[in-house]
Amino acid sequence: MVDRLPVDEVAPESGLLYVARLDGRRMGDRDGVFARFQEELRLPDYFGWNWDALIDCLRDLRWLGAERCLLVVEHAEALLADHPGERAELLETLERLSAGSAGGAGRGRVPLRVVLLAD
């Protein structure tokens, strides 16, 4: 199944857009998830390498210096494949943050959009 997204939903017409591409095949466990997010999003030094710290960093992306952030997870089917509970929690969190319902937009915050690419 192929879903199509209008480009203006994920990329603005103008302004500074930060794009991070993560490979789900390298995110098989929580350490892999944290390492990929840390590398690709250049998480701040205060990142605590736990789920709450990741969520806090993703809620407030102002430290990126961009107006918007696009997070692309390639091979998303491999993301935490052997940890279904953690996978569901992470995907639900990313969905809430991308929709803006978990503090991901407004109040001077940098909007986050997430695109999952999977076979």
Image (cartoon, helix red, strand yellow):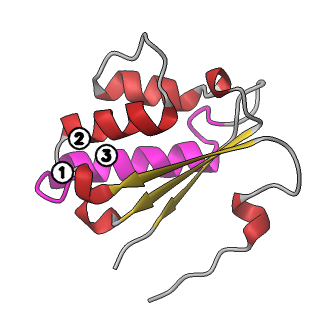
How far apart marks 3 and 2 lie (CA) works out to 16 Å
Q: Between tags 3 and 2, which lies in front?
A: 2
Q: Secondary structure at mark 3?
A: helix
Q: Which mark is residue 40?
A: none
Magenta span contains residue 117: no
State how far apart marks 2 and 1 are (Cα): 6 Å
Residue 84 on the magenta span: yes
Where does the image place residue 88, in percent across and percent down from the top left?
Answer: 29, 53
Helix, strand or loop status at disc 1? loop
* Residue, disc 3: 89
Residue 56 place in picture, x, y as percent: 47, 23
Which residue sits furthest right?
14
Q: Is residue 27 left or right of residue 83?
A: right
Q: Which residue is mark 2?
A: 32
Task: Identify the residue at image location x=35%, y=40%.
Answer: 36
- Residue under numbered circle 1: 28
- Looking at the rendering, the stretch of residues picked out in magenta corresponds to 79-104
What residue sits 64% from the left and 27% below the top? Answer: 64
Task: Looking at the picture, tell me which residue is in the foreground, 39 or 55.
Answer: 39
Which of the 4 image quadrants contains residue 9? bottom right
How far apart marks 1 and 3 lie (CA) works out to 14 Å
Q: Residues within 10 Å of mark 1 (few under 14, many from 20)?
A: some
The three-letter code of the residue at mark 1 reads Gly
Q: Quadrant of residue 46?
A: top left
Q: Is residue 11 left or right of residue 72?
A: right
**Dot 1 or dot 3, earlier in sequence:** 1
